[in-house]
Image (cartoon, grey):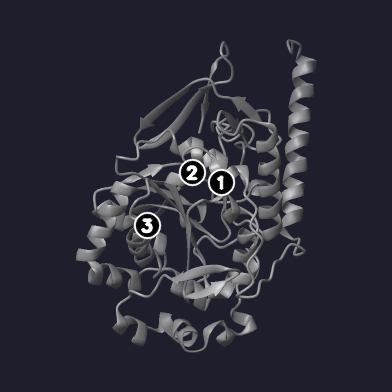
Amino acid sequence: MFNSKRARVRVAFASASAVIYLIWSIARLGFDDTSRTSLQPDQPLPQVQLPCRSLPGADEVLVILRSGSTELDDRLAIHLSTSVRCFPNYLIFSDFEENYGGEHILDALADVDPGIVKENPDFVLYRRLQKSGRMALTPSELAGPPDTFASRSGKTGNPGWKLDKWKFLPMVNKTLHERPDMKWYVFIEADTFLLWSMLQQYLDLLDPTEPIYAGSPTFVGGVLFAHGGSGFVVSQPALRMVVDHYATHKAEIEKFTDSHWAGDCVLGKAFADSGTPLTNAWPAMQGDYPGIVQYAGAIGSDEDTSRLWCGISVSYHHMSTAMIKELWTFEQDWAAKNDPVRKVFMRPNTPCTDYHITEYRFLTTQRHLHLICHASDDGPAQRLG
């Protein structure tokens, strides 16, 4: 029992100390380059069947990982030895079609209007890649590890980043034509980390027969869209609707893309125009890594300080290779000791690290997802997310 003021202070102090340690650990990992992985294009990794590949519902989910030629060694390679090993179904897109680490990488830009590819200055790097492959890249063009504090307006001076905005709609279109039979399509970037078991529980709350486009909300120029780096979830009906819209408005969308700087915003507008508004999946899908997520509001503020402490974790962004390796290993160890089908992994080292789910209720309020669960058969209901 923790009825006394002194006991409550001790609990609060212990919880705060645990979180400070976690933040320090993750921040330290952010500057650790020892986990950088370099693969030869034809060098496959040994495949070992992991329990995470056979989670209920996992075979109905397609993960689409968007990367670029300038970042394969620094950001994609770590996924091939960690995250991808849990995905029964996945596609990898870049700006150059090739085989890398035993994986076939699709060209996300193959269907862009040939006139744009030939003349648009955004495609200078792409034209070089098509001629000479990644050997055409100079050291200054390589992306390097994810920035600790990345600019919210992107890296508009980086040639690979300029290309990236053009990938979204063609990638979505190609995804449906490659794998039209999936219930769920989950789009991530090379510095995104998915907590795979939590994603399955999250998707189990949703109706795959409804048009759903869910992610962490962002506004640019009056357009509400899912932040690409946080990851976003699309149901098959929503994907078909936006692909049909793209097919009939391709020239208009490409013109809008040319005038814009954020491809995820262009995609969000296309979803809205096709009849699927954004469903808010924050804070389950985060735009940063655990060390700099704001778990609580400022002292004395009126902000709901509990919503991040006990919110489920589905994705993180701006993850270094060391962070991805650390969290992936942790998730595998945690799943081996717990029931990943019925137990929710919360944010690490917080007062709400684990909840055993005995009841789910799903609420939708203004297209915001809330997970309501019971900590135990006779315990109080907890709102997660």
- Residue 157 visible in rendering: no
Q: Farthest residue to the bottom: give it.
A: 131
Rendered location of residue 121, percent (x, y)? 40, 84
Q: Is residue 257 left or right of residue 103?
A: left
Q: Earlier in the sequence, mark 3 or mark 1?
A: 1
Rendered location of residue 180, percent (x, y)? 33, 55
Residue that badge 3 annotates: 179
Q: CA distance from mark 3 to mark 1?
A: 18 Å
Q: Amino acid at mark 1?
A: Arg
Rendered location of residue 144, percent (x, y)? 64, 71
Vertical order, 34 against 183 (above or below): below
- Residue 350 visible in rendering: yes
Residue that badge 2 annotates: 58
214 and 181: which one is in front?
181
Residue that badge 1 annotates: 53
Q: CA distance from mark 2 to mark 1?
A: 7 Å
Q: Amino acid at mark 2?
A: Ala
Q: Earlier in the sequence, mark 3 or mark 2?
A: 2
Crowding near pointer 3: few (<14 within 10 Å), some, many (20+)?
few
Q: Secondary structure at mark 3?
A: loop
Q: CA distance from mark 3 to mark 2?
A: 15 Å
Rendered location of residue 380, percent (x, y)? 55, 15
Q: Residue at x 27, y 67 (%)?
A: 253
Q: Residue at x 75, y 64 (%)?
A: 33
Residue contact between numbered discs 2 and 1, judged by CB atoms under 8 Å: yes
